[in-house]
Image (spheres, rainbow, N blue to C red):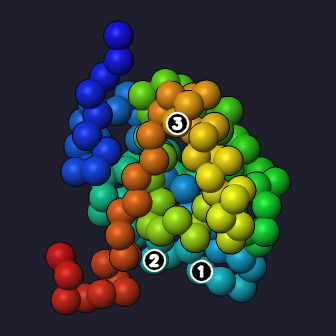
Amino acid sequence: MGRNIDWERGNLHMAENVYGYIRVSSKEQHTDRQQIALIQYGISEKNLFSDRQSGKDFDRPQYKRLLRKLKPYDCIVVTSLDRLGRNYVEIQEQWNIITRKKKSGHRRTGHAPSEHPERP
């Protein structure tokens, strides 16, 4: 008995909980653009998880906290896949953890609105 969540069209209304994940590589970089995009996407600030750490691996405190919190039919939203990490193989491994073991989903918002002002 599963839910029919249309991840491709962004129909998140059937997801139990929707979380946003934000990552920047260094303490000098700002998370504002990603945070604004995720909030505009409809994610509550209390459901945002943010790391200021390299994407070389997934040993990040807030990412690990998010995975522990994730339940079946929850959804993680990122502004782009490179916010998850830099290593394609590791991103695929995390995707398997999220979708198969946790039975949750992942959604990319697209570009942050401030990056492309001509887009809504």
Vertical order, 94 against 35 (above or below): above
* Residue at the extreme top: 1
Measured as percent of width and height from the top left, residue 23 is found at 62, 67
Label 2–label 1 contact, CB within 8 A: yes
Q: In which quarter of the image is the N terminus?
A: top left
User: Secondary structure beneath disc 2?
Assistant: helix
Task: Determine which residue is flagged by label 3.
Answer: 99
Q: Nearer the viewer, mark 2 or mark 3?
A: 3
Q: What is the spatial separation of the Cα atoms under label 2 and label 1, in whole angstroms?
A: 8 Å
Q: Is residue 35 visible?
A: no
Residue at 40 percent across and 60 percent down: it is 108
- CA gap between label 2 and label 3 equals 26 Å
* Cβ atoms at labels 3 and 1 below 8 Å apart: no
Residue 3, compared with residue 114, is above or below; it is above
Q: How many marks?
A: 3
Q: Residue beneath label 2, please? A: 33
Residue highlighted by disc 1: 30
Rounded to the nearest angstrom, the CA distance separating label 3 from label 1 is: 29 Å
- Check disc 1 and give the amino acid type: His
On the rendered structure, is 48 left or right of 101? left
Which of the two labelled residues, at mark 2 and mark 3, occupies the earlier sequence position? 2
